[in-house]
């Protein structure tokens, strides 16, 4: 049965490209066996209206392709174009999504199209194309990945594939340590099993006579399974990645060792304060970013990264934030906004996630990001940012630079100070939200906010009634 491809775009802007994709898929030997293309312009006149037709076809497709150019297109009563509605429906229905942006259109791009592109780019990697031939090549590569993900061309995820390593090449001591942790954290029966091969078999970490890639990443030499199986940590002096870095280390040992070393790299370089020793023998220590939030971001990056990619996990420390990036994208069906609430756990590497779960590093309830958010809120910090940057998924943990001393030095009025206190717990605010927090009238609020932008404390985003103000990131 063919998988239906739905092509979404402003039709008049991409008439040539839409037909070119259809003809390419129908003419390519492998693709035509597995895919068919739906184009609205190919459909005969019928009783269904365009909106109903679009909705039903997105529901029925397996693959959603969106083409982005300069025009946002027709808007409904809510000010939303059919293309954006279709994208939202494809997200909600967990369709395979791929996006292609036409080169040279950014200069004259509609403001709403630019906003839509940012929304799209926060969720998945998009590719730029200059001509139809270039576009077809990118569509081909993306559709082959769909067949891989659907187990048509390759039925096993990376971590389940056989390695070239022998059982005797694995570290038996590390396996015994894992057995101890599994008993401690999950009351697992693994400790009762003797023999390295027996433990691996019980854990589904064998493929025939050879350990699979997950086994090597945990108990062997990770780079024999994946060349890029390492974690790079950099510490910069300011807010930008200007070399030379203050410090730079690469960790390429087993995954648990990479996690522990990377967390220590960050925590040892974060500012910390020591409380009063009144209820315990040791005084409490508070870091600029909670350790639990840092650990969660690093563990997620290492657990869910794409190990077939050439790039490594990278942790970059700046004066105002810590960025944790890993190659890969959010699982199909998840959006950055969904990470801020309870959501299903959809591991990219199921076996890696299982070993980390038994070792006590993660839970399997989809609560990691919400716990990260809670920890930052409880510490009086902004919520973390989650976004897609090219082929990298990036989590940003913010330090608190809105200190009392910082505010005092800027000579702000009482309304502005109160507004910043509210902003401390949020990611951004509108003029209306500022007025509600401070009691200012519209004109006064606009003047206050403009001054905060001029002083480099806030950043203005959007235009007209959609303007929002966020922390500039000092």
Image (spheres, grey):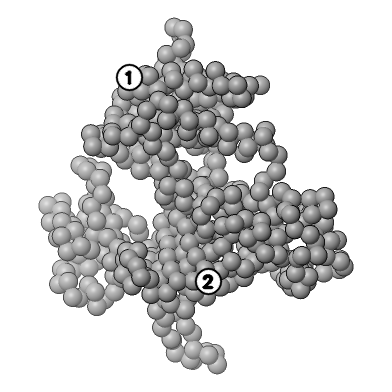
Q: Secondary structure at mark 2?
A: helix
What's the residue at 41%, 49% (across, down)? 389
Residue 381, compared with residue 279, is above or below; it is above
The quarter holding residue 147 reads top right
What's the residue at 56%, 21% (across, down)? 28
Label 2 neighbour load within 10 Å: few <14, some 14-19, many 20+: many
What's the residue at 38%, 71% (across, down)? 245
Find residue 199 and report its horizontal and vertical position in percent.
82, 62
Q: Residue furthest top?
A: 45
What's the residue at 77%, 56% (across, down)? 211
Q: Which residue is mark 2?
A: 263
Find residue 36 and report its horizontal and vertical position in percent.
56, 20
Q: Quadrant of the N terminus?
A: top right
Residue 82 - label: none
Residue 400 appears in the rendering: no
Find residue 239 and report its horizontal and vertical position in percent.
31, 66
Residue 400, compared with residue 66, is above or below; it is below
Residue 12 - label: 1
For the residue pair 143 and 341, the one nearer the viewer reads as 143
In primary-sequence order, the first of circles 2 and 1 is 1
Label 1 neighbour load within 10 Å: few <14, some 14-19, many 20+: few
Q: Is residue 88 left or right of residue 300?
A: left
Find residue 439 and report its horizontal and vertical position in percent.
20, 59
Q: Is residue 80 left or right of residue 407?
A: right
């Amino acid at each position: 049965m063919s998988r239906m491809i739905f092509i979404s775009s402003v039709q008049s802007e991409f008439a040539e490209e839409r037909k070119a994709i259809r003809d390419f898929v129908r003419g390519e030997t492998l693709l035509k066996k597995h895919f068919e293309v739906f184009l609205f312009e190919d459909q005969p006149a019928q009783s269904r209206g365009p909106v109903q037709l679009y909705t039903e076809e997105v529901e029925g497709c397996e693959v959603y392709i969106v083409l982005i150019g300069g025009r946002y297109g027709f808007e409904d009563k809510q000010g939303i174009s059919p293309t954006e509605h279709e994208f939202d429906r494809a997200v909600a229905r967990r369709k395979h999504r791929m996006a292609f942006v036409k080169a040279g259109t950014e200069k004259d791009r509609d403001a709403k199209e630019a906003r839509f592109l940012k929304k799209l780019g926060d969720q998945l990697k998009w590719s730029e194309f200059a001509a139809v031939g270039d576009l077809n090549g990118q569509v081909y590569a993306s559709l082959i990945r769909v067949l891989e993900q659907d187990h048509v061309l390759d039925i096993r995820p990376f971590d389940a594939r056989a390695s070239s390593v022998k059982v005797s090449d694995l570290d038996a001591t590390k396996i015994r340590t894992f057995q101890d942790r599994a008993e401690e954290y999950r009351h697992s029966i693994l400790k009762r099993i003797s023999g390295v091969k027996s433990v691996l078999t019980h854990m589904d970490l064998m493929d025939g006579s050879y350990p699979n890639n997950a086994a090597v990443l945990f108990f062997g030499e990770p780079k024999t399974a994946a060349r890029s199986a390492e974690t790079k940590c950099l510490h910069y002096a300011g807010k930008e990645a200007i070399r030379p870095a203050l410090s730079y280390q690469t960790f390429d040992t087993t995954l648990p060792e990479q996690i522990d070393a990377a967390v220590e790299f960050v925590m040892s370089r974060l500012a910390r304060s020591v409380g009063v020793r009144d209820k315990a023998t040791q005084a409490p220590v508070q870091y600029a970013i909670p350790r639990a939030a840092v650990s969660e971001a690093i563990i997620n990056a290492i657990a869910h990264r794409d190990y077939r990619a050439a790039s490594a996990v990278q942790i970059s420390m700046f004066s105002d934030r810590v960025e944790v990036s890993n190659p890969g994208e959010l699982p199909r069906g998840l959006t950055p906004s969904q990470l801020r609430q309870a959501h299903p756990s959809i591991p990219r590497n199921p076996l890696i996630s299982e070993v980390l779960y038994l070792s006590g590093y993660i839970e399997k309830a989809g609560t990691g990001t919400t716990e990260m958010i809670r920890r930052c809120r409880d510490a009086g910090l902004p919520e973390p940012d989650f976004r897609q940057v090219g082929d990298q998924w990036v989590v940003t943990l913010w330090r608190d630079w809105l200190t009392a001393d910082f505010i005092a030095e800027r000579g702000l009025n009482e309304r502005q100070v109160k507004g910043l206190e509210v902003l401390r717990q949020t990611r951004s605010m509108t003029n209306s939200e500022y007025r509600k927090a401070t009691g200012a009238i519209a004109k006064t609020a606009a003047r206050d906010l403009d001054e905060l932008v001029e002083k480099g404390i806030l950043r203005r985003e959007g235009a007209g009634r959609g303007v929002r103000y966020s922390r500039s990131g000092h």
